[in-house]
Image (cartoon, rainbow, N blue to C red):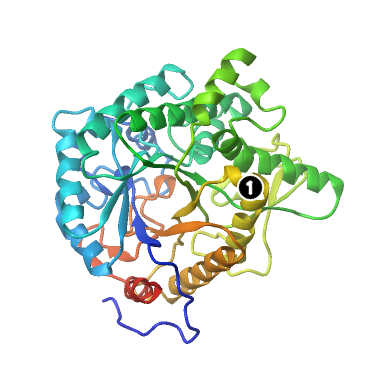
Amino acid sequence: MATDDAMPARPMPRFPDGFLWGVSTSAHQIEGAAGLRGPSVWDAFTAGPGRVKDGSTADVACDHYHRYREDVALLADLGVDAYRFSVSWPRVDSPGGLDFYDRLVDEVCAAGVRPVPTLFHWDLPAGLDWLERDTAARFAEYVSVVAGRLGDRVGKWITLNEPAEHTLLGHALGVHAPGRKLLFDALPAAHHQLLAHGLAVRALRAAGATDVGIANSHGPTWPASGDPADREAAEFYDLLLNRMFADPVLTGRYPEGVGELMPGSPGEVAADLEIIGEPLDWYGVNYYAPTRVGAPQGAEIEFGGVTLPAELPFSVREIEGRPLTDFGWPVVPEGLTELLTGFRDRYGDRLPPVVITENGCSYEGLDDRDRIAYLDGHVRALHRAMEAGVDVRGYFVWSLLDNFEWAEGYARRFGLVHVDFTTLERTPKASYGWFRDLVRHGR
């Protein structure tokens, strides 16, 4: 049961009027009802043996498709201002698929919560391929359809979720769908996702949208030492996972040397960058932890459940002396302050207001005090960044529900609400009650 415990002994800092408190989910991770949508690349991926650690699929997941009213009631009780969910492109491509999102948006609005749809959260329809340029144009067409149907009730939109991870894990290392192991030959997938983002912004503007952002994952990169080889490796990693996805969106340019690696002639890439750099109303940041990076060690490295091949020009090292989540990720709240102030310094006036679109952790149990400590530390770190002058307009916890955690299956529990994946019963955790109190106090 969720507790009604008082806030922690240290007073929580106050946040500005209008600051947006929310929770996030994604379609493939919670909806289920796989027979009522078309297949996605994730359906094909999970059908392969050994690709998901517990051998599970998302065919049922949390069965949110049939239980969305119950889940919206949890949102209403939580008292959040906004609910970030994703729209499944394969479902929209199926007969009656948009009807579900019509019903969901109506239910969310009736609960007094703002719907914040993400238009792509990794579940690409089977038969499409981010290595192909045409997929970006197809995405823009789909976005126009969704915006035309939901735009009368949706004000805030997110184009893509974490194109960096989708490129790295799905196309370079092969541990996520579609399961390709292309290493640096995966860069066209990055460029075409960014192009899709820019085309989606234009499609949303054409539909009258005035509150558009993207959800990019970022974290500080810490050199393993002061050695020049470690520093150089860390700079490369930062370019690959942070700047390659932020610079084009915020400045209309790739970092030096990167544009030449993208598909097309220099003139074609330059034309694409004009689209990719379409002005945004806000910039979404998904933050979990910094990464400590050193020179390559000539051997495979296990990192966060992923095997990094020896041929990469960097190695990822452990951040010592920090508590770890059940996923093995270090808990470093001050990394969020460092990230946000660093973005302010790097991008200056080009950085629009920021929204933390994901922040959360995996822990077992209903009395999840470690999750409370994690969230408490990160909310305070966020407030310190705001005190330092960073314009942050909102904070979304990942996630409302325990869910299908991609290649980890159901072994990782990020939810404020526990889901029994046999009975599908929902049970609010202690962190649910804590976050409910935080939202009340934060206002």
| Count of numbered circles in the view | 1
As drawn, 50 above or below 412: above
- Which corner quadrant of the image does residue 388 belong to? bottom right
The residue located at (23%, 69%) in the rendering is 77
Viewer-nearest residue: 112 or 370: 112
> Residue flagged by tag 1: what amino acid is it?
Gly
Picture coordinates of residue 52 (x, y %)? Answer: 41, 44
As drawn, 438 above or below 155: below
As drawn, 62 above or below 248: below
Residue 296 visible from this viewpoint:
no
The N terminus: image quadrant: bottom left
Q: Is residue 268 left or right of residue 320?
A: left
The C terminus: image quadrant: bottom left
Q: Is residue 122 left or right of residue 341?
A: left
The residue located at (70%, 38%) in the rendering is 310
Viewer-nearest residue: 301 or 242: 242
Picture coordinates of residue 190 (x, y %)? Answer: 53, 30
The residue located at (26%, 44%) in the rendering is 154
Picture coordinates of residue 329 (x, y %)? Answer: 55, 59
* Badge 1: residue crowd in 10 Å (few <14, some 14–19, many ≥20): few
Picture coordinates of residue 288 (x, y %)? Answer: 53, 57
- Which corner quadrant of the image does residue 4 belong to? bottom left
Viewer-nearest residue: 17 or 385: 17
Check disc 1 and report its element: helix, strand or loop.
Answer: helix
The residue lying furthest to the right in this view is: 227
Q: Is residue 142 left or right of residue 220?
A: left
As drawn, 179 above or below 153: above
The residue located at (58%, 60%) in the rendering is 336
Viewer-nearest residue: 104 or 431: 104
Q: Which residue is mark 1?
A: 348
Residue 239 visible from this viewpoint:
yes
